[in-house]
């Protein structure tokens, strides 16, 4: 009996010592926990509960969620030595928590500097017109360059976008005048094309009427038929003199060919 009681006391003591020595640590969802033993990095803890020794153990949480870094008001020079002021927004997340915290002092500062340098490098390779008109995808080229550098200190760059593109006042006026002149030239070209098509159709119609004059009379009758649906209209129709002469000739020919009436003498 004494031995059993002693064993129960020892078990309770061991359990109490275990509860005192071990603590429960919970890593929230969207975070990673870096476990340090006596100041040295041991391993990365995932989301969920973890039981750790109280002494010489420390857990540092790292946010793994997607974040946005804004680099405002960067004035850069294009290839044609024109100043361009723009702001850049970069979406990124921590991909390797241990690398992000141990390789650099502040990964946000390093990312900020990388965006600045990449923007100057990419803008200096292209003229202003290509950047303004979108012939060069500056945002995509910027994302590719920054992502390669950020991977070295544990970051994953999802996207890079240009928020604002500001030009000097004189350049804005020049671009507006150029755009206006381009639109006016395009409108004039469309007008000339329409007039050319209309003249071509008229020439084809004239050629068809010349080959078949009856088409003109049919067109006249069609116009009269469509206009006669409205009451109160008066039409003055001019006839072709040749048609009038032909109808008269046909009338004279028909009257002369009729047989003589009864009672009239016939020449023998």
Image (cartoon, rainbow, N blue to C red):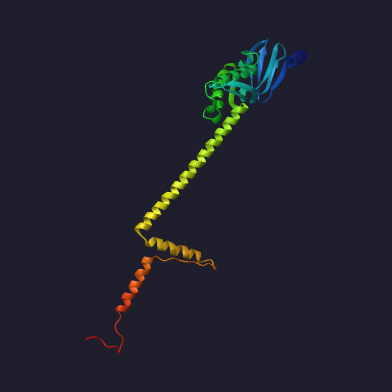
Q: Name the quarter where the N terminus is drawn.
A: top right
How many numbered marks, from 0 up? 0
Q: Residue at x 49, y 43 (%)?
A: 190
Position above or below: 113 against 217? above
- The percent coordinates of residue 27 (x first, y second) are 68, 22
Q: Is residue 189 visible in this depiction of the protein?
A: yes
Find residue 122 and report its image quarter.
Answer: top right
The C terminus - image quarter: bottom left
Left or right side of 242 for 87: right
Looking at the image, residue 65 lies above or below residue 39: below
Residue 163 in view of the camera: no
Question: 88 and 265: which one is in front?
Answer: 265
Q: Position of residue 247 (x, y in %)?
A: 36, 71
Q: Is residue 181 above or below residue 229?
A: above
Q: Quadrant of residue 262?
A: bottom left
Residue at the location (53% across, 39% down)?
Answer: 184
Q: Nearer the viewer, residue 246 or 54?
A: 246
Viewed as shown, does residue 234 lie left or right of 29?
Answer: left
- For image coordinates 60% across by 19% down, the residue present is 116
Q: Position of residue 92 (x, y in %)?
A: 61, 24
Quadrant position of residue 69: top right
Residue lying furthest bottom in this view?
A: 263
């Amino acid at each position: 009996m004494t031995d059993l009681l002693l064993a129960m006391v020892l078990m309770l003591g061991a359990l109490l010592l275990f509860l005192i020595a071990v603590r429960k640590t919970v890593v929230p969802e969207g975070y990673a926990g870096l476990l340090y033993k006596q100041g040295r990095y041991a391993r990365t803890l995932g989301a969920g509960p973890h039981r750790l020794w109280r002494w010489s153990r420390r857990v540092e949480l790292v946010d793994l969620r997607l974040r946005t870094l804004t680099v405002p008001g960067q004035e850069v020079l294009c290839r044609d030595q024109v100043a361009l002021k723009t702001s850049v927004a970069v979406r990124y997340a921590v991909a390797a928590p241990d690398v992000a915290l141990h390789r650099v002092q502040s990964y946000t500062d390093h990312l900020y500097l990388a965006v600045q340098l990449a923007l100057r490098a990419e803008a200096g390779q292209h003229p202003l017109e290509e950047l303004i008109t979108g012939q060069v995808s500056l945002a995509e080229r910027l994302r590719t360059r920054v992502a390669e550098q950020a991977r070295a200190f544990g970051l994953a760059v999802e996207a890079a976008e240009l928020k604002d593109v500001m030009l000097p006042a004189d350049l804005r006026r020049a671009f507006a005048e150029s755009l206006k002149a381009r639109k006016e030239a395009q409108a004039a070209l469309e007008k000339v094309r329409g007039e050319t098509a209309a003249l071509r159709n008229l020439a084809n119609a004239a050629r068809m009427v010349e080959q078949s004059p009856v088409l003109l009379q049919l067109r006249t009758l069609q116009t009269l038929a469509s206009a006669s649906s409205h009451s109160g209209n008066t039409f003055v129709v001019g006839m072709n003199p040749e048609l009038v002469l032909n109808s008269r000739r046909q009338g004279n020919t028909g009257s002369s060919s009729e047989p003589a009436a009864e009672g009239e003498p016939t020449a023998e």
